[in-house]
């Protein structure tokens, strides 16, 4: 999803400033020491089970015997931006990184839907936590962190809320699916607003070719699915379950900052004292801020 057009009032949010003098992580500029016995490697993964299908993707394994802390990186809708530059840098910092596609996307068998993607996110966490997989891939199951971009930001919030042992969660320009529509109401003016919001999303998804890599769905059907589940798919409601864990909230000038600022506020109201925020004056893909974004992510991971 290249952008999300929101009808919102002027947004004012105090964010943690990103200073040019911020510490530059070594993983941004240097490769790690080689380990002949346990080299860094990339696994072409094709066997991650989720509800009768196998998710496809890559598992970047860090050098060294381990076990290693592990990031599960979840892409957005539909995932034209994969953020694999982040994955490589995170691995250089000593973390494994799992990055797979949802059912019905990018050649994975099955049907794409938001409900299925939510289930797939949970399946990814279960996969790395499984004792046999943890041993095989040198995973420190006490240090599993979720990181998601756009729709992936919603998926990591959902998965972290479902699994209290997830050590931390980061979202980059997260799309709060349920908040894309006005609150439920039966009056006629509300129904008109709902239809306008639906049309806006359909037009956007169509213009951005978001349905092209997806199977078993239409953009109209996906928007209707999001609308029908708007009350339950609002990550602000997950704040109490996430109150005890570190959360990174990164925003840009793509129109999603109001949603994500509201989420950060909800976390703080729930008692979370470990919320880190950063804002970049760039687009939804952080096209001209990739190194700065990577710096923020690496420095945040170093605190977990």
Image (tube, helix red, strand yellow):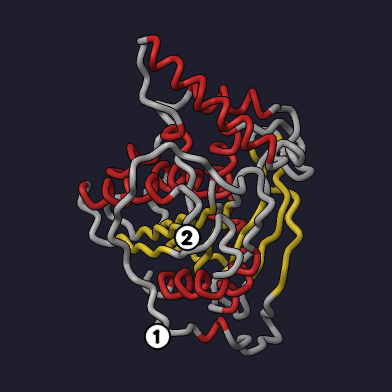
| Residue at the disc numbered 2 | 144
Q: Residue at x 63, y 32 (%)?
A: 203
Image-quadrant location for residue 237: top left
> Which quadrant holds the N terminus?
top right
Could you say where residue 279 lies in the image, as x and y percent from the top left? Answer: 41, 63
Q: Quadrant of the C terminus?
A: bottom left
Tell which residue pokes out farthest to the front in this image.
10
Residue 266 image point, x, y percent: 27, 46
Chain-order first, disc 1 or disc 2? 1
Residue drawn at x 63%, y 72% is 88
Q: Could you tell me which residue is drawn at 71 percent across and 31 percent down? A: 111
Q: Nearer the viewer, residue 65 or 290?
A: 290
On screen, residue 274 versus residue 66, left or right, reads: left
Of the pair 204 and 51, the residue shown nearer to us: 204
Q: Are marks 1 and 2 in contact (CB under 8 Å)?
A: no
Q: Quadrant of residue 135?
A: bottom right
Give the distance between the C-alpha atoms of the residues marked 1 and 2, in whole angstroms.
29 Å
User: Is disc 1 surrounded by few (<14), some (14 to 19) or many (20+) residues within 10 Å?
Assistant: few
Please state the horizontal and vertical placement of residue 288, each as a whole percent of the image. 59, 69
Q: Is residue 101 left or right of residue 284?
A: right
Regarding mark 2 in the picture, which secondary structure is present there? Answer: strand
Callout 1: SS: loop
- Res 278 quadrant in image: bottom left
| Mark carried by residue 21 | 1
In this rendering, the label closer to the viewer, 1 or 2: 1
Label 2 Cα neighbours within 10 Å, binned few <14 / some 14-19 / many ≥20 = many
When the figure is inspected, residue 14 is found, relative to residue 100, above or below; the finding is: below
In the rendering, which numbered label is found on residue 185?
none
Residue closest to the eye, 248 or 277: 277
């Amino acid at each position: 999803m290249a952008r999300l057009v929101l009808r919102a009032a002027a947004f004012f949010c105090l964010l943690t400033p990103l200073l040019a003098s911020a510490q530059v992580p070594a993983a941004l500029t240097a490769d790690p020491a080689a380990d002949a016995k346990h080299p860094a490697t990339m696994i072409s993964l094709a066997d991650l089970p989720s509800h009768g299908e196998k998710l496809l993707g890559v598992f970047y394994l860090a050098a060294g015997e381990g076990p290693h802390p592990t990031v599960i990186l979840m892409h957005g809708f539909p995932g034209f931006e994969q953020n694999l530059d982040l994955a490589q840098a995170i691995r250089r910092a000593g973390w494994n990184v799992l990055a797979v596609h949802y059912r019905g996307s990018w050649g994975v068998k099955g049907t794409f839907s938001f409900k299925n993607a939510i289930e797939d996110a949970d399946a990814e966490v279960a996969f790395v936590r499984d004792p046999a997989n943890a041993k095989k891939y040198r995973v420190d199951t006490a240090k599993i962190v979720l990181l998601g971009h756009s729709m992936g930001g919603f998926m990591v919030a959902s998965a972290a809320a479902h699994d209290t042992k997830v050590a931390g969660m980061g979202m980059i320009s997260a799309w709060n699916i349920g908040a894309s529509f006005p609150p439920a109401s039966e009056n006629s003016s509300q129904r008109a607003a709902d239809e306008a919001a639906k049309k806006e999303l359909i037009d956007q998804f169509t213009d951005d070719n978001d349905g092209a890599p997806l199977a078993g769905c239409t953009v109209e059907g996906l928007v209707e699915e999001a609308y029908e589940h708007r009350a339950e798919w609002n990550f602000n409601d997950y704040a109490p379950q996430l109150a005890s864990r570190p959360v990174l909230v990164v925003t840009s000038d793509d129109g999603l900052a109001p949603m994500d600022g509201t989420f950060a506020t909800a976390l703080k109201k729930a008692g979370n004292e470990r919320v880190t925020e950063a804002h970049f004056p760039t687009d939804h893909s952080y096209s001209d801020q990739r190194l700065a974004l990577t710096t923020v992510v690496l420095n945040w991971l170093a605190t977990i």
